[in-house]
Image (tube, rainbow, N blue to C red):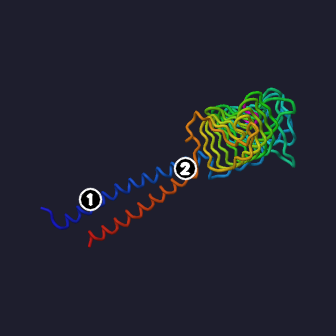
Amino acid sequence: MYTKNMVVKFKFDFQGMYSKKVLSFVSLLFMVVLVFSSFVLVFSGVSFFALGVEAPDEVVKNEAELVKAVNAAPLDKAPYVIGFSVDIVLKKSLEIPVEKNIVLVSVGDGVWKLVGPNKQNTITVKGLLTIDGIIVSHADGKSGSGVFVSRNSTFTLLSGAISGNTARVDGGGMYNEGTFVMAGGEITDNIAGDWGGGVCNYFGGIFNMTGGEISNNKAAVGGGVFNGGTFSMSDGEITGNTASAGGGVTDSGSFYKLGGVISDNTSSDVVNDLNIDRWKDMGDAVNGYLIVFILAILVIVCFACVVVLLFYHSKKRKQVTA
């Protein structure tokens, strides 16, 4: 036989159980929103931490010293900073090996050059590379991409430039099959015979542009950028580039423009900043501001649900115990 106290306790337990389930659901929804927000921020190249480059571990002044320093870097992926004190001319493409994390910087008063050999890439990245304040180039009349990034490799440009490179086929300044993060610096005055005068982000490649400038590059397709992979632009500028198709950007993959400026690029004597492959779903060109707005609404709704639920639970508890 139920007493009044037992009925009151049963009502309280049932309401508490129901409230806990709703609270659990709302908490789970809130966590999903936070995880998705973090994914969008990371995917767009936004970082919560600024990358600071430390003093050089070693300073070099010729090719032999540079290659020796790269080979001496640890295999634990800890950043190994190599400083340039003069311009260095290469006889062979500089290779950044797997499992190594190399940072190239200029020391002293100058911004020093790394000049590539004819018909070779100046730098071939198979591990991790960061450039902060050097210029990657080729001598006049010599050919080769500035930087080639292999699959499962990462290249970050913080400052400095990739300039004056000429590729017979694709990727005058940059040819990327891995991950390329452009946070600053310039990619300028490069030429490609086919795709991507400034950057060729090849199929499967990831290119996050959060700053810097891609300008005055030339190609048959995609004067500034040819994208066949995933290209996310949240800041920076793509300007003054020239191509037969897509003076600024030619997209045959997925292009997410969350910010930045694409302007004053020329295609076949006509201003043409963006050429999206007509065979692709136009939905690949996503307005990032809409994503941010939706995420903000979801967060506000979740917060409001938690507040209302807590208020309702508190009110019911007072009624039951009264």
Q: Which residue is under mark 2?
A: 38
User: 152 or 44: nearer the eye?
Assistant: 44
Res 79 → quadrant: top right
Q: Are marks 2 and 1 in contact (CB under 8 Å)?
A: no
User: Residue 14 has which mark?
Assistant: 1
Closer to the camera in the image, 252 or 245: 245
Q: Which secondary structure class fits the magenta region best? A: loop
What residue do we see at 84% from left, 45% from top? 111
Residue with the most extreme bottom position: 322
Q: Return the x and y of residue 43 as percentages of the image width and height.
A: 59, 45
Q: Quadrant of the C terminus?
A: bottom left
Q: Amino acid at mark 2?
A: Ser
The segment highlighted magenta reads 170-174
Query: Where on the picture, by quarter, is residue 157?
Result: top right
The answer to whether residue 181 shows anywhere in this view is yes
Amino acid identity at mark 1: Phe
* CA gap, disc 2 and disc 1: 36 Å
**Quarter that holds the N terminus:** bottom left
